[in-house]
Image (tube, rainbow, N blue to C red):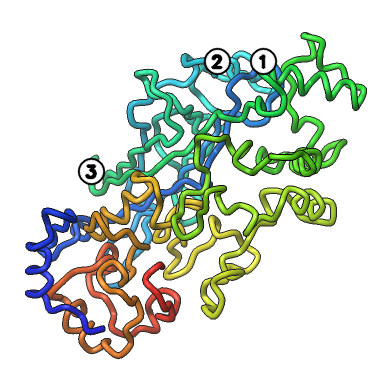
Amino acid sequence: MKLLRNSQLISVCIIIAAFTGCSKSNNVPPGSEGEYAVFAWNDLGMHCLNPTYDKLVILPPYNNVLVQVVRRGELPEIVTTGITVSYKLTNNSTSANKRSYGGFWDNSLKLFGTTLPGDIGLTGNGLTGNMTVNDNYYIAEGIPVVPVYDNGVWDPYQIIEVTVTDGNNSVVARTKATVPTSDEINCAKCHGTNAFDDILSEHDSEHGTNFSVASNRPVLCASCHPSPALGINTGPEMYLSRAIHGSHASKPGIGCYDCHPGPTTKCNRSISHTSDNGNCTTCHGTMANVASTIGSGRVPWVTEPACASCHTGVSEVSTGAALYRNSSGHGGLHCTACHGSPHATYPSTLESDNYQSKQYQGFTSEIKSIGSCGVCHDSSRGESDIDEFSEEHGGTNPEKKIGCHACHTVVPVNTAKWPHGYTWKNSNI
């Protein structure tokens, strides 16, 4: 497929603008100007928290957001000095004063061995603050966000606003990202209205514990059953994930979305990786498989599917022993910076997940990984058109800027320097 000439593209956009929202007549994606670009992402498709903290407790309010800041240039540079990266949740200024979440702070000493001020999480972070540097990225770990806005509306897809300021306290870059957090874990489908009471009573009956006594509550499940999700890797009993998946594997009519995190919230939202049930078992295995493989060496939250398991034939897609969410390439940029958060990679069914794809590429109808030629072209390979690419997009004064210009003031024509060695073959990437 030949690339559209600049004049052709403008004409097409003028004709279809009213129908698609295409507005590219200035040929400058809105995020490709200025000295800096900033990319932000959540480290999981969904962080879950308990709806209450007075009975059994699986997870606290705890959400991680990572950021990379790039100084734009012919050779872009990831920046970790001379700037401040701050964050705040949109329309969400408190957690402890909503619904029953205050029980986390009331019982934090018993559950987690520390007394916490209201709205401060286990790492000392609140709902606003400055991020800290870790290697070549900034992070706000353990944000105690809950899925309820200040006006009382429940929404598991909270939004974080990230602002970058320079040494003069001038704003140099901004972006937004989804902070997913759901409290749907309640087990009522099988255990009835008072599900947590029922579970603790069954546990007492089957295992000789005494959790029905009020003075023994609340109980943190991971205090006996290790949960790497909480950084607890050893304990007297089997992994919590093995215990739960194994005990429910034979129950009829139980699916992943009954618990992860519930029937309403969508944990996996990536269009290319999603089916009605989240497509969970394709990558993670059935409940029985999860339990049996943990018993034979699999570590929950650590041993996870790899991109290269499905995306074969592209060597640079392999992240080796590292998880996708912890992996980087292309000058040290995290995979998630261009492809999106785990379980919400571009394009996502959720509008807010796609914010940065639009910010750095300008389109509202074609959502792709940042820098994908598939934003405009049916095929994102087009090796026969590389000379035409140089004419349209290369050099110091291109006819049309593209997503690569979010970081690069000059896009190299040498395809060996492009992400994944210029070997992708379809527009879904």
Label 1 to label 3, Cα distance in Å?
43 Å
Closer mark to the observer between disc 1 and disc 3: 1
User: Percent position (x, y) of residue 370?
Assistant: 34, 63
Q: Name the mark on residue 100.
A: 2
**SS state under label 3:** strand
Q: Residue at x 47, y 68 (%)?
A: 329
SS for dot 1: loop
Q: Position of residue 185 (x, y in %)?
A: 61, 30
Name which residue type carries label 3: Val
Q: Is residue 188 above or below residue 251?
A: above
Mark found first going from the N terminus, 1 or 2:
1
Relative to 263, is 418 above or below?
below
**Residue placed most toward the observer, 323 or 118:** 323
The quadrant in which the C terminus is found is bottom left
Q: Are circles 1 and 3 on residues that touch, CB within 8 Å?
A: no
Which residue is depicted at the point 34% across and 69% down?
372
Q: Which mark, by number, is residue 54? A: 1
The image quarter containing residue 407 is: bottom left
Amino acid on which the number 1 mark rests in the picture? Asp
User: Which of the image's four quarters has the N terminus?
Assistant: bottom left
Badges 1 and 2: C-beta atoms under 8 Å apart? yes
Gap in angstroms between the C-alphas marked 1 and 2: 9 Å
In this view of the protein, can residue 110 be seen by the observer?
A: no
Q: Earlier in the sequence, mark 3 or mark 2?
A: 2
Q: Residues within 10 Å of mark 1 (few under 14, many from 20)?
A: some
Image quarter of residue 315: bottom right
* Element class at badge 2: loop
- Taking the spot 55% from the left edge, 49% from the top edge, the residue there is 278
Say which of marks 3 and 2 sits in front: 2
Residue behind mark 3: 171
